[in-house]
Image: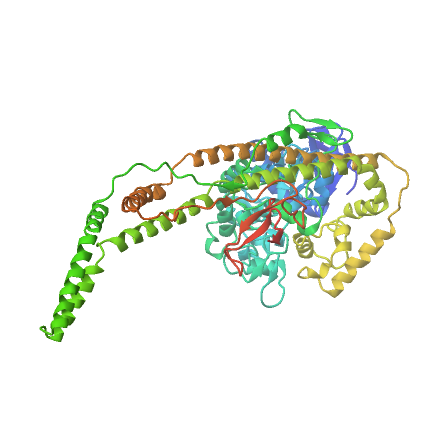
Amino acid sequence: MKTEKLFSDQQELVLGRKIAQGGEGKVFVLANRPNYALKAYLPSVVAKRESKIRAMVAAGISAKVGNVAFPEKIVLDAQGNFAGFLMKLVSEHQEIHELQTPVSRQKLFPAADYKFIARVAVNIARIFANVHAAGCVVGDINQRGILVAQNATVVLIDADSFQFSSGQSRYLCEVGVPEYTPPELQGWNLKNVVRTPQHDAFGLAVCIFQLLCLDRHPFVGRPKHGNDLSTEQAIKEYRFAYSARNTNMEPPPGTLRLDDFPEKIRKLFEEAFSPNHVNSRPSPADWVTALGEMEQSLRPCSVNRLHHYSRAASECPLCRMERTYGRPLFVSDAAHPVHLPGGRIDDQTGLALDLQSFMASLNNTAIPDTISLTLPPKPALPPSAAALEYKRQERLTPLWRLAGLAIAALSLAGFSQRGFPGIVIFIGLTLAAWVFFRQPKGDVEIDLRYSQLGDKVKKRGMEVQAAAPIERAIHLKAEAFGLIDDYKRLCNAFQNVRKTYDSKRRERQLEDYLSNISIRTGKIKGLNSSNLAALNSYNFFSAFDVKRRDVQQVHGIGPVKKTQIMTWLKGVEQRFQYNPTYDDKDQRNIAADKATIISKQQAIDEKLRSAIKSLQMEMVRFEAWKNATDPELAALLPDFYQAEADMKHIGWALRGVEQIPPYKVSSPIPGTVPKCPYCNRMMVKRTARQGSNRGGQFWGCTNYPMCTGTRSI
């Protein structure tokens, strides 16, 4: 473009630096219009764009929709011919992919955490809602057209490409990026396609998914069966890789999952990418509501204060991702390390905690080694009617025996005189034996009732003891001791930050250098936008990611493209120069390392205070349990006491059938339980709910579910 004179409102424009350049023209700041930017079209584009831009300016669309760089004023050349337009200057904003990609986020948005990302997602949806309300359709949704500021505000640029209607005239959006184009338009020539808000709804959902899932594309994954698909083909076939429906796709490893989000968010993603909702995709307003609710409900991670996640998730998904890839997703802003009220930063230990007070609280909270159930005092009960009858009959027993002897004597006398037939004598002796050995009725029933009731009391008492609400207290106390151990290790790490940094300084310089070289801007031969989206979805963002993992695990990256990527990596590494002299960057790195440790110490402080408070509440609950009466046991005891009173009345010995052995409690005191083989925290006894050891006990890590370490007992 010639540097000819340009005018707006009859005022000559003084061009400043060029801030952008594309296939249609160039964008400049203006020295004499500081709040405006100029887009000057190439001569070959002027005629095609003039009527649309004049219509947008005449409609005053810029005043109707904030935070969108719509054309505001017409720009003419010296001959009065249309040359371009003025729009609001958008400064100090970054393209959206710089926020969602870990490498660039840590450099350009160092203070951003996941709550910040959620807030940006809400703002993007709100702007799309405003654009649609103004009668426009974005059409060409892409990551370069959405800009984000440090305060999470969002601006849309390239608004001159939006589809716009004025009266009977409709000006189409003639271009689009395949990764954001809905299935029904994949492969179409977009120059003559009338876009609708439903088309935008697909691209908006893709954009929100990539933002919330940290640059993962929803249609990038690996087929469970068959050959790999391009991203465009996967979109065309509705192969949402994260869907609960059967799409024959599985997402890349180490990503967020749909069940990490609230149900409303999951439902909106499923509908946005489903063939059954092509004409009823979620609107921007739907996303504003759902994302706003999610933002408000995000909870902080107990391990890393920079992590926030939905209460719908069973664990922190960001921690899970970091464990998979071994790199932090968020870093503390070294210039603004945070600390909790009441805490102070010590040069030697980092965040200084009052460990003595914590230990005193733990040691003063005594958990019993055994649980013994004390039965209520036995009342003085009269014998039952059955026992009285038995005793009455027992007093007649001597008379019955005399009668038996008499009958026997008469029978024998008759036998000796041979005056009675043999059968009569036999009957007489049998009757004599029955009378002599006759026992009072009810003896078996009384004894059996006493034994059975005693066994029931003992069994229920053991069940009550085993169900005592003490296990969570044990867990909490062990967890608190484990947190104290973690804090001590962090203090040691804080004290040795400089020493640790020095030992790995060259390695870290190379790592930082490679981490700052983005694949997206590398212009690697043979890679298209679909390949870049796939690489990002598989957590390949920088040269460092390429160096430590095999890129061929990414669908669409075969041996040829891998060779091109590795050639690029080799060239990047050859340009690395080690700097042996300490500089400001080293000091910032050390400060960032310290800030990261302090952040972890703060998380421990929060969790430790919470554990001790919960422990004390559990012990109050345990004391209340000890003083309570079990209804089932209370119902058994009156009958048992009556059976025992009957036994005493009759004079039979009591056998202690109801004696309940004490229940042994595993001790949470350090040294009496093993440490986790993975994270070195204390462990507690747990009961297996499934598998070959179902019902058996094992040692489980107190940091579950963040850590799944186990040991056999």
The residue drawn where x is 30% and y is 36% is: 380
Q: Residue furthest top?
A: 342
The residue drawn where x is 13% and y is 74% is: 423
Q: Is residue 665 above or below residue 187?
A: above
**Left or right: 114 with respect to 350?**
left
Location of residue 189 (image quadrant)? bottom right
Number of numbered markers = 0
The residue drawn where x is 14% and y is 68% is: 413
| Front position in the image: 218 or 511 | 511
Please state, as top left, top right, bottom left or bottom right, where the N terminus lies in the image: top right
The residue drawn where x is 66% and y is 36% is: 484
Could you tell me residue 369's position as x and y percent?
55, 41
Location of residue 609 (image quadrant)? top right
Q: Does the rendering let one see residue 594? A: yes
Could you tell me residue 669's position as x and y percent?
62, 40
| Front position in the image: 579 or 109 | 579
